[in-house]
Image (spheres, grey):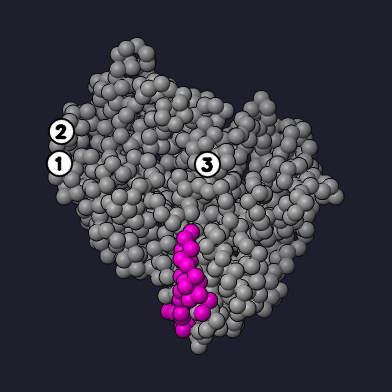
Amino acid sequence: MHHLDATLTVDQRVDALLALMTLPEKAHQLTSIMAFDLIRPDGSDLDTADDVLSRPPGHVAQLIRDDPRLLADDVIALQRRFVERTRLGIPALFHAEALNGLLAGGHMTFPTAIALAAAWKPELVEQMARLMRGQLRRVGMRHVLSPVMDVALDPRWGRVHETYGEDPYLVTANSVAYVRGMQGDDLSDGVIATGKHFLGYAAPEAGLNSATIPVGPRRLRDLFAVPFEAAIQMAGLGSIMNSYSDIDGAPVAGSREILTGLLRDELGFDGFVSADYASIDHLVTVKGVARDLSEAGRLAIEAGLDVEFPRPSAYGDRLVEEVESGRLAAAAVDTAVARVLAAKFRVGLFEQPYPQEVIDIPAVAAEGDELSLDLARRSVVLLENDGLVPLEPSGRRIAVVGPHADAPELQFAAYSYPSWRQAVDAIHLGGEITMVGIDERADAWHQALLPAGEAQHLARQRLGTLSLAEALSTAGAEVVHAAGSGITERLGDDAIAEAVEAALSADLTILALGGASLWFSGERTEGEASDTADIALPAAQAELLDRIAETGRPFAIVLVQGRPYTLPASAARSRALVVSSFGGPHGARAVIDVLTGVVTPIGRLPYSILRHGGQLPLYHHRATGSGGRLASPDQSSGYLDMPATPAYPFGSGLSTTTFELGQPRVPARIATDEELAVVAKVANTGPRDGATIVQLYLRVRGTGLTRPFQQLAGFQEVSLEVGSTAEVRFVVDSSQLAHTRPDLRLVVDPVDIEVVVGFDAEDDSRRAHVVMDGQSRDINRSERVYFSRSSLDRPERPTFTPRLHHSTPSTP
């Protein structure tokens, strides 16, 4: 029996190869190496290459080039060293970041994850991931460290933009879609996706990155674990990355309860767990639960953490020493190695370790361009509109004012290639990057990519990215622009005066405000290790907004942001408010297309926008009885100085027409093993064709335990011509109402259900009541249903395609 015999089962091939491996070979199969620790940017070996290859790692991290052909050539050159110059010829698994596009030059960048969530279109996320899968395999990458499956509950935390928002249903839908697209139906033709960060990472105490997660075992399972569970059960998720955080005193990187008991025994995961960069080191240096790296490595591998990224520190030689000393059982190493080898066999790495296709650079660069534009347009959220949108730009003088007025590079968030380029430039010039384990090889990164200061050139010339001012000018307006302020920096009285003068000279002002998601020190407001105590719009921008509002001239606000900021009172004087969430190369164009009526707005908020930071935590599914979410509406609970509700709730978004939604029709009773059907009529009652998203929320009462006040249970996009109607139908499986009891059984109980259909999470005037009868029943996770089925019954008049719709514009 030989491990290269493809007719054998994966388990047989793993057993055959394990029998041939020495302990050091096994231990280093659980490590990674940074690509530029092996080769120079010109492709030649470093002096350390032979030493590394004497103990070949199982993984290669962060091989990034500006040219896809050079990237593929480097993968081939490195992989040949593993296959041809090591004793057993085990190919390495190359991994890359691919949250919203392959993190390498010459490939399409898509809107960041929170923008994808704002599109409320998971099938397009699957299409995006499927396209990226082909690009990744073309350059020899078979493993990605994406998607982020965290449910983001705290806007102080800087990485909200990497997530799919605050709601577990929406996060789960997009996570499953991404994994399906990336891994495909057969992993031998796919790329291994990594769900991160297991578990609860986006709800840290005080909003601080890597802080403890204040959560109990029931909520951990019913809220934070659901996206991972669904991706495992529905899409065969191949890899998991641990969280930096700790839960109930145990850092996840060293918690057997989390990484084995919950992840494998309960959720059914059978892939491999990879360490978030340096998280095993953090057991010593940050969390203090281990006295040295050897102890940290032992804790991690016994917990079920299989692979150390990005370099060998606590694994590799230290694992060998731990086994030889008797402090670690050899079986723990064998178990982890078996998981890694199984993944390599499943992804077809032994049969085809090298990229095969000839790369056509122009074709690769353009691949996915229309999809990127479509996602960017769909992600734009219109929150306020005083008759301004759609706007006719032709023949109008429009001022574009603010830090986002003429900054195309700020349309890209961290974990996209242009942002990476900015980080590399910053390192080279003496700055610090916030991503762990990257800055040690700054010179190599820099030489392998572009000259310093080329990030904006990359955005404009290579990716065709327009600034908001440029996009508006292209649409036909006479445009004058002025920054007025930096993202966080006050540029001075003269800068503000210039912006005010521009506003006074124009028919309309567009205030281009918001955040900056960056990987290096500077004017960043969000990103990795970029948390803030204050979630208000930065003071410099708030001052600019106040001054523009004081002119009395009409203005609209465009917020470019990856997490929600609270707004000053003067924002209420704007005639329109639009949110754009780092839309990538077409981000500015998408905003202008919505403002000018080229497309009808369809984006909806994937998070709540608060009135004040003092409301934290605030999200639509908080526990019944908390934050003003009471079981009886005649009871009151809130603040003396403001409502307890958000300024803009989850799911908010306007069209340029109006819709009416009828009362939901439901059966009076269902059993605990039956489906719930909900039907509601929707009509376009406004002056234009348009589109909306009908949302279904369920409120459960009577389980003996406090449950979320409501849960999103489905949504359906509806596009209707003027005067037409349709019926939206949802079918909800009773297992969608399952919850974890104190004994950790997953159970559906007989309950009362309040059914709500609306246009956002606070729009609850249309309700119906259902009694779910029968016996409580235990739910097997392999049979659990995570999503409702929704459909649109044939309307009385035909629907239209919103992306192609041209509205009748208004004048300012």
Kind of residue at badge 1: Asp
Q: Tag 2, which secondary structure? A: helix
Quarter-of-image position of residue 59: top left
Percent coordinates x, y for residue 144 in the rendering: 37, 44
Determine which residue is flagged by label 3: 208
Sequence order check, earlier mark of 3 and 2: 2
Residue 497 vs residue 336, the one in the foreground: 497
Within-10-Å neighbours for mark 2: few <14, some 14–19, many 20+:
some
Determine which residue is flagged by label 1: 45
Residue 682 vs residue 71, the one in the foreground: 71
The residue under the point 33% across, 50% down is 431
Numbered mark located on residue 663 in the image: none
Left or right of 563 on screen, residue 452? left
Kind of residue at badge 3: Leu
Mark in front: 3 vs 2: 3
Numbered mark located on residue 50 in the image: 2
Which residue ends up furthest to the front in the rendered image?
A: 493
Residue 187 vs residue 503, the one in the foreground: 503
Within-10-Å neighbours for mark 1: few <14, some 14–19, many 20+:
some
Which residue ends up furthest to the top in the rendered image?
A: 326
Sequence order check, earlier mark of 1 and 3: 1
The residue under the point 34% across, 26% down is 314
What is the span of residues highlighted in magenta in the rendered image?
472-501
Which residue ends up furthest to the bottom in the rendered image?
A: 395
Percent coordinates x, y for residue 290 in the rendering: 43, 22
